[in-house]
Each structure stands twice: as structure tokens, then as C-alpha cells.
Amino acid sequence: MMQLAKSTREMFHDRRFLKKALMIACPVALQGMLNTVVNLVDTLMIGSLGATAIAAVGLANKVFFVFSLLVFGIVSGSGVLAAQFWGNSDVKNIRKVLGLSILLALGGALFFVVPSIVRPQMVMRIFTTSEASISLGAGYLRIAALTYPFIALTNVYVAMLRAVNRVVFPVVTSCIAIIVNICLNYVLIFGKFGAPALGVAGAALATLTARILEICLVLAYVYGKRLPLACGFSGLFGWSGQFIRKFFDTSAPVIANEFMWGLGTTMYSLAYGRMGDNAVAAITIATTIQDIVVVLFQGLSAATAVILGNELGGGKLKRAETYATHFFILEFFVMLASAAVVVGIRIPIIGLYNITPEVAHDVNLCILLFAAYMPFKMFNYINVVGVLRSGGDTKMCLFLDTSGVWFIGVPLAFLGALVWKLPIYTVYALVMLEEVYKAVLGYIRYRQKKWLRNLAVEIT
């Protein structure tokens, strides 16, 4: 306890650390918060059309969820290398990382775009047996899938901008895109100002327009300001064999990690989808409310990965270890405040939805369970996404995430939903046990210090 108190005092007195952590974490968290606000507004607007509409869009977005995790895996793995190269002042290799990431992200986008456009009903049948949800969801999915390539490109550039400590402008672009998205949602969903009332398809069109605008703004910023990322095709491509091996040695486990984890959590949706539209609506609303605080830890974990990556790439291993401890302490305090917030706002936000008392009851219990599991879940964000990945310990991260989902979460989801016929909040409680498992094994791995590596030196 005395050592913990000492480390806490050191963390609060380390102005350099706090300034840099907040400089990166706050814009990333704000950007995530803004995206969550859009999702909340989307759900509220679509929710006025009924529980089936909420369920349809929620299930259709599971395709985007798996796709976004694949892209997140690509940009997380590449971000680790880019952050260490930036710590080593190696702009040339940062551009090579950017080029390879663009190629992989756009290739991944096409893998999801084609079936979503060609056979959207078939894709929707993977998640639900409700014909009403399939019909509504397919119309939404066919349009929403067109946004995937633009989102992939945006995410790659934003991750690279974070690696070189340029985190403010992506928030500005998100603000502009979000305002456009919300305004177009109102116009196209309900048919305002002479536009046709397109319902859920209108929400998809609004998102497509906003995402195209967002990537145009990001590219204009990168090339207009002539940032380190701005270069021609020759700067982005032409990788050496050693570079490609190191890239995939670091990134491939992260890509596999996020994809397999995303696929596993999508299996939860398959279980929920067979519990009925009310259960899907409840978990969709609960997840949207939870995301209000989850984005804080996404920002904190991004700051962890960038700052530790910069220190490790600069050969400052001892300082990186100290900063890792600081981040865990900071995470604990933010977690306590966030748990209080999510519990406090749950009733007013639930009251905004046009749902039955039964669905509202289930949403309330899901949120309370989420708050109870927060100490484990948020520790895992910082440890797995931030600390372990910053030093390239990505294979262990792959093991932690995939084993937690596939050996604990998925079996319990199907047993609870289809065999034991439990209510949605009890199934959710069983699924969240995977976070406890990951926290225990992840802490042991952190203490082994195998993540303290300078990858920039290993490549050059």
C-alpha cells in the first residue's frame, strides 16, 4: 500500500507525464464521445420508429462492428510501430507503415462491402430470425456498407496522426462530420425540408455523406500542412523484406486479435438475436449508454500506447515502465468517476427512448452490471490495448482476448440464451466474466515485463 501511495503521488507530481497523457487522451476520448453522441442520436431517432427498427439497425451494425475491429487491429498494430519510429525520429519508416496500413485497411473493407451490398438479407439472417428486422436491416446495411472504405482510410490516417502527436485536428473533422450526420439524419429519416422520409435507410445515407466529408478534410489537412505523413506513392510503398516481416510480426497478432475478438463478440449478437427483438433492443440501448464512458478509456489506452511507444522507441525503457504504472493509477481514478456517472445518468437517458417498461427494466439492469464489471474491463483496456501492445507483446494480447471470448464469453452466451433461457441481463452478466479472466492473466503478463522492448532499433 505504501508503494502504491508513493506511485500515486509521483504520478500527480509528474507534470510532463500528465500534460502529454491529457494532450493525447482528451482529443481521442472527445472524438470517441462525439461518435457515441451520433450513435445515441441515431438510436433515439430510429427508436421513434419502434423496437424492431432499433433491433434491425443494431444487428446490421454488427457487420460494421466486426469490420471496425479489423481496421482497429490494423491501425493499432501499425500505430505501435509508427509511435516507436517517431520516438526514433524515423519519418521514412512511418510513411512506409502508413502505406502498408492503407493497403490492408482498404482490402479489409472490400471483404465486408461486397456481401453487404450483394446479399444483405443473407448477412442479416446470420444475426436474427425476425423477418421484420431482416427486411429493415438489409435496406440499411446495403447503403451503410458503402461507408466502410472511407472509414478505413480515415482511421489509418487518424492513427498515424496520433503516433506523431497530431491529435487535435481529427477531433475538428469529427465535429464537422457529426454535425452533418445529425442534421442529415433528421432530414432523411423523417423527410424534412421536402426530402423523402427514408427511415433507417436515411440514417445510412446521412452516415455515408458525413464519412466522405470527414476523409476529405483529413487528407486536406495532412497535405495542406505538409505534415510528416504527406508524401507521394513512392514514399508510401516499396517496403523491404525485413520491414514487412517486422510489420507483420507486430501487427498480424493485433489484426487477428481484433478480428477474432470482434467475431466472438458478434457471436454474442447471434445469441441475443435469438432471444427476440426486445432483448436485442435492450442490449443495443445499454451498449450505447455504456459507450459514453468507454470512450474515456479508449482515449486513455490510445495515449498509453503512443506515449509508451515513443519512450520505448527512444530507448527510455525505465521511464516507459514508470509511465505504465502512472497510467494504471490514472485509469483507476477515471474508472471510479465513470462508474458513478454511468449509474447516475442511466434512468434519465433510458426515459428518452420509446420502449416498453420491460425493455427499460432490462436496460437498467444491464447498465448496473456493466458498472460492476468496470474495474476489470477498464484495466484490460489500458493493459492490453495500451501497455502490452506498446512494446510489441501482441501475441499475448491475441491469446488473452481470443481465449476470453471463445472459451468463456461465447459458450456462456449460448448456454444462457438458448439452453438455460435466462433473461438478457443475466446472459450479459455471464458474458462479462471473460473480463475477469483477462484481467488476472493480463496482470501476470504485465509483471513479467516482456513488453519492455525497443522495436525501432530491432528493425533498423
Image (cartoon, helix red, strand yellow):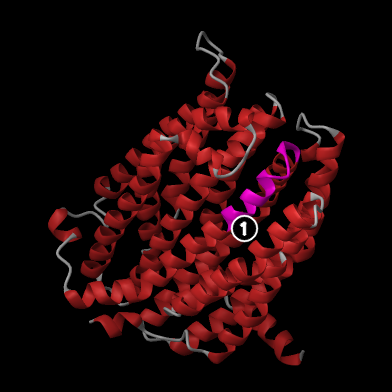
Query: What SS does tag 1 mark?
Result: helix
Q: Which amino acid does label 1 sit on?
A: Leu
Q: Is residue 71 above or below residue 310?
A: above
Between 223 and 428, the residue placed more toward the observer is 428
Between 31 and 202, the residue placed more toward the observer is 202
Task: Give the quadrant of the N terminus.
Answer: bottom right
In terms of secondary structure, what is the magenta stretch mainly?
helix
Does 447 lie within the magenta span? no
| Relative to 434, 169 lies left or right | left
Q: Give the range drawn in magenta.
A: 265-278
| Residue at the image position 51 percent from the left and 66 percent from the top | 303
Q: In this view, does 412 lie above or below 135?
A: below
Residue 10, x across and y down, in percent = 64, 83
Residue 343 seen from this side: no
| Residue at the image position 29 percent from the left and 77 percent from the top | 246
Q: Is residue 399 above or below residue 99?
A: below
Residue 400, x across and y down, in percent = 56, 75
- Residue indicated by mark 1: 296
| Relative to 337, 401 lies left or right | left
Q: Is residue 78 above or below residue 216?
A: below
Q: Quadrant of residue 460?
A: bottom left
Q: Quadrant of residue 314?
A: bottom left
| Residue at the image position 58 percent from the left and 71 percent from the top | 382
